Each structure stands twice: as structure tokens, then as C-alpha cells.
Image (spheres, coloured by chain):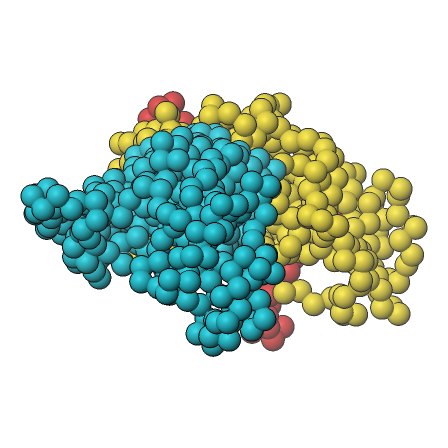
Chain colours: A red, B yellow, C cyan
Amino acid sequence: MIEFHLDARSGVAPYQQVVQQVRHALRLGLIEVGDQLPTVKEVVASLAINPNTVLKAYKELENLGLAAARPGIGTFVTKTLSDDSLAAHGPLRQDLQRWLSKARRAGLGEESIEALFRDVVRASSAQGVA
Amino acid sequence: MITVLEANGLSKRYGHKWALSECTLAIPAGKVVGVVGPNGAGKTTLLHLAVGLLQPSAGSISVLGGRPGTTAGQLARVGFVAQDTPTYAGLSIAEHLRFGAWTNPSWDQKLAEDRIEGLGLDPGQKAGKLSGGQRAQLALTLAVAKRPELLVLDEPVASLDPLARREFLQGLMEVVVDHGASVVLSSHLVADLERVCDYLVVLVGSRLQVAGDIDELLSSHHRLTGPRRDRGSLPRDHQVIGESHTDRQSTLVVRAHDPVLDPLWSVEKLDLEDLVLAYMSRAVKVDRRPKLEVRS
Amino acid sequence: MTRLTLRQFRTEAVVGLVLLGALAILLAVSGVNLMNVNDAFRSACKAARDCATASNPVVNVDKPLQSALPFLATIAPALVGLFLGAPLIARELETGTFRLAWAQSVTRRRWLAVKLGVVGTAAMAFSELFTWMVDWWAGPIDAANKNRFGLANFGFHGVAPIGYAAFAFALGATAGVLFRRTVPAMGVTLVGFAAARLAVTYWARPHFASPARESLPLTTGSGPGFGFGGANGASVVLNPPHVDVPNGWVYSTAVLDKAGHAPTSPYMLHACPVLDQVSEQLAASGGLPTSGGGPAQFHGCINKLSATFHTVVTYQPAGRFWPFQWAEMGIFLAAALALCGFSYWWLRRRYA
């Protein structure tokens, strides 16, 4: 059974954080198809967050096809992401490695690389707001 | 939409001072409502009006469709925990539960006992000897065990240490999951409310500043930063909540349902604390924000 | 709600019962003693046929108790008001627990009614039990002194104390509602109760019924204080005799003629020239001795005056003792109920 945590300062909506943590756990193989996700009551009791937040997160996971709710019993994992991370991202991984070599040759240290990466990610997702 | 609390021009006066002025609200059922505002803004007054501890000086309020505090039936549907969680110091926890059983026809003794046991409290302990957090949990148990449709809590965690605070909110959320009760809780700290609330009411200076679903509020309020400009350049349906200008730069907090299309504005989301602060500053009508925007 | 109220006042109830128990034992012991002394006196005086004149030694038995008990019995209702009435509502208001109580499914009216009713009844019961015990104990003394209707004793006999306790309790509760703090409420209760008791005793009770008046021949006057006195060297006054109305309440005695006038100084000097001779003596000593063993002139003057003047006693007859008790209880009970109504109204107005 996985445990969630909430980063109040991250700027990411709580329900998104729950979704991300489930996906992360799936990727790492901590949970597998058929495993039950913590009940709403369990999540709420450990995190002290609004039950609707958990419901929203689980709904999102359902929309993503990763989980399914069985009424009266709980929410269960229906698809794993482990395969995705290994096979499907091969080309992406190579592209990234090439870009990293370029960045290092340009003189960027680890911190600058991470900062640049985060900045670009944020800017591209913020474009949807304006 | 079923409303759990409806207020119309609700006002309360003490002598010449208005503790609450012209408050009009319609809070839907099934929400965890946070009432936030500085001390003296009228939060306790609003909550006391909602549970029938006060009568309005003007306007009206109806809770779960009835006038607060009037009949035993109405009182049974609303659970209340007052500020500083008063308990009878000389009575033990078990005696408090018995008190609840004697005075509430809808009392669920098993629920109360299970909760006390789950909290690790000794039923024979006198309430006066409990810690602040334990007393708060006892008060919550008393409010919850009569199975109310609405729970009202006045600054329940204000005087608790962080651990007790977290435990109280965990317990409260469990209650919401188990019983589906609507909750209205007040605080002067936004951080307390952020995790648990999905509906917000902001009171400042005895007046209602803004009320609404938190997701809706966060998606409709933006911070606009851009070169120094007059606010008049914005579309008319963009409501300016706050603004500050330096000689080069303007920063505005805006409420808008349509997206801001002007490319000169850099648009950012606000977090809940910033949103509340914007409304508080507006209410005070003094621009206290520093010239340079400092993000906390 | 009833059970909660009883639980909240558990300590007071225990203290009250303990005190009553201790008092019961004390009074039982002393009371039996008093009865024995009284019985002994009765048989002795019957044998000697001087029951009317012999003085009953019972009035000197357990003297400390005799002084203390009337005082305790008088303040008992006030204590009830202080310790049961004042904290009743004030404690809940000052600790904030009324917000807990009013969040339960009881209406304000029921909450107040039960509190006032349960504790008020207990207060009245305690007070009456206390009074009954003191009343029983004082039986022999009352029989000897025959003064239970008097101002000092009326208040701890019969049923009036029930009214006092109810009033003190209601006053305490109302003060608690008004001031919202137990200690100020206690202060107000004490002062208010004392004022009410004094006011009723001196201004109301004398008017419950028109007093009876009776004329007695002046020559039968007796008792300390009866006699001539000098007011300021030149004039003479006649101090009225002491008149005993057994178990009645004497308002006053006066020496008056048929028209209701007292003998004036010139009249008395004219009627009894001898008084003039001793006027300096009068001024110096303050009066001639009483009829018990005075100079012949005194008797002569009295005889002379008695043709025109009589001793007039204004009093309530003994038979009115119980009606007066009921009336006094009624007044205080009515005031108590009015106070309860007021405190309910005030509470609703201020809070809900």
C-alpha cells in the first residue's frame, strides 16, 4: 500500500500531487495492476485534506485509464506505467542524452541545466492560462 | 442546489458598533467551508448567528432550512464547537458523553465511545486535566456523536500545537468521509484552511469580501504583471481586486472569467493565501504592499 | 438536563447534606437537653403553683447555641442564594460552557427552567429542613419566652424561610445572568437579599394587617423602664410600661388618654406637685424606680393619672402568626418567580 504526502508550497494543486504520486509509484513498480489504492478515508486521515480532493484525484486516474472504482469496495489499479517508461521512451531518452551533452559542452553545470529545464516546462504549461 | 446556510443582508450590532454588516451568502451543502478574516472581522459573530447563540439585528439567516437555535429538532441537526472548546472542567470524559446522550435524542453512544477510544483518551479523565488538543477532540466528539448534518467550528485549531492541529483536522476529515456532514470552520490563518476547505468565505471589517468554491476562485483570479499602466486598459468585466504601481511596473490582482488576452500582461496564478490577502488589503483601503512585489 | 444539573451541583449537595447532618446531631443533643430542663421546670412549678411567675431556666441552657442559631438561621437563605443561585448561570457564562450546553438539543427555555427548577427546589427544601430543625429545637425556649412573632425571631420559624431561600436563589441566578460573573453576582445577591429582608420586615410586615389596640389600666403597668423620667431638668416624662403579649407581636406601648394624647409635662407637674420637688433628682438619676419598690409619691401620681390615662398597646395577636408567615412567604415567592421570568427574558434578549 502506498502512502501519500502533500507539499503545500509546491504550487501544484493537491489533487494533482496525488495523481502524480500514484503515477510515480506505478512507474517504480511499487504498485501493480489489481492493487487497491488507499481508501478515501485512509488518505484523508493521514493527510488531513478534503475528501473531494482525493475523489478528484481518483477520478482523474480513472480518466487516464490507470484506475477503476469498484463501488462499495475501493479503487483499484487497472494499468501499469512501468512498460511505458522502459520501451516507449527510448527515443526520447536518446534525444535527452544528446541535448545534455550539448548543454554540458556549452558550459552549464547541473544546477543550471535543471533550472533551465524547469523554466521551459513551466513556461510551456503556463501558456495555456493566458 | 441545496443550501446549508443562507443569509440575506444579515447584520449584528452591539450598541453602535456593527459586528457584521449586510452579509448575503448561499453556502451549498456537502462542502467544507472556511471562513477566514482577521480578528474582529465578524467570523465568530457569523458562526454564532448560524447556531442560534445570537439573534440578528437586521436581515435573516436560515440554516438547513430553519431558523437557528429555535427548536430542539433544529439544534439536533447542527453540531457546534465554540472557540477555546469549552468543556466542564469538573466532569470526566465519560460524563460528558452521558451529558450528550441525555440532551440529544439522536446521540450515537457507540460512535462517541469508539472515537474516544480511537483517540487514546481515558474516559475517566476529568476534562479540566486534558491538554488543549485533547479537549478539542472531546468537543469535536460531542458535536459529531449526535450525527448532525452541519458542523460549525469556531477557530478550532487556533490555540493548538502543530501536531494537535494536524490530528484534529485529520479527525475532522474522517468525520466528513464517514457522515457526509457539511462543515463550516473559521480561522484567521489561511494555512489551516487550505488543505481541508473547498469553499471560502472572506470577512474583513464586518463585511463579506468574497465567497465561493475555492477551485473556482483560484481559476478566476490572476496576478497580472506588466509595464506601468492604468487599470482602465483592462476589459470592463475584469474586476480589479488590488493594484500596486512603481514608476516602471504595474501589478494587479484581477478577477475575470474570460482569459486575459493582452500580451503585455504576464499572467500568474495566485495561491489561496495571496487571494485572501488581496481581499484583505482591498478592504483596508490602504495600499500597504511594498513597491517591489515580494513573493512570500 | 435534570441529571446534568444534579451532577454539576454534586459538591454543593454533598456539603449541604453534611452540614445538615452535623446540625441535626447538634440540635438533637441540645434539643433533648432543653426538653428535659423544660419538663423538669414544668413539674416543679406545677408543684409549687408558681408557673406563671417562676422563670424558666431553659432560657439559659446552651447559651452559645442560643445566640448562634438564630443568626445562622437568618443567614442560611442568603448562603443558599450565594452558593446555589449566583453560580447557577454565571459560572456557565463566565467559563463559556453555556455555548456547549446550548449546542445540544435542548431549547434555552428548557435549559433555564430545569436549572432553576431543580436547584431552586433543592434550595427551598434545604432551607425548610434547616428551619424545621431549628424550630423544633427552639420549642422549649419559645414556650418560655413566648416571643416567636417578634422581629428577631419571626424569620427563622414556620414557612417564611422557604420564601427567603427561593428569593435569594432567584436573586443570585438573576444577578448571574446580568453580571455574567459569579463573584460580583454573589456580592449583589448578598446586598440585595439583606435589603429586601430589611425592607419587608420593617416596612411591609407591619402592614399585613391592621394591628389591634388594647387599653389597660395604667395602675397595672410594670416592667423595666416604667416610670417618670427627666428630659431636660425642667420637664417630666412618663415612660410607658412594658406589656407582654404572649406569642404576639407588640408594635408599641404608650400612655394615652381617650383622645390619644400623652400626658404633658405641665399636666403631670400640676397633677403631682411632688414631682417638681424631685425634678432635679429626676434629671440626675434619669428616673424614679418602678412600681416594684418605689417611693409612695410614685404610686400616688400613677393613681392620679390613671383616671385619665391608660396604657395602650398596639400589637398583632398571636393567632395571626401563621397568616403572617404565609403572607411573608408569598411575597418572597412571588418576587422569586418575577425574577426568574426576568432572567429568562434577559437571557433570550442578549443571546438567543
Q: Quadrant of the N terminus of chain C?
A: top left
Seen at 44% across and 74% down, the residue is: C285
Residue B128: quarter of image: bottom left
In screen coordinates, is B27 left or right of C206? right
In screen coordinates, is C307 left or right of A36? right
The one nearer the camera, C105 or C334, is C334
How far across and how far down the image is residue C179, in percent?
Answer: 54, 52
Vertical side of C60 occupied by B138: above or below: above
Vertical side of C228 occupied by B210: above or below: above
The one nearer the camera, C213 or C49, is C49
Q: How many numbered marks appear?
A: 0
How far across and how far down the image is residue B292, in percent?
Answer: 76, 70
Seen at 88% across and 43% down, the residue is: B235
Seen at 42% across and 57% down, the residue is: C300
The one nearer the camera, B90 or C110, is C110
Seen at 60% across and 75% down, the residue is: A107
Is residue C233 visible in the rendered image? The answer is yes
Residue A32: quarter of image: top left
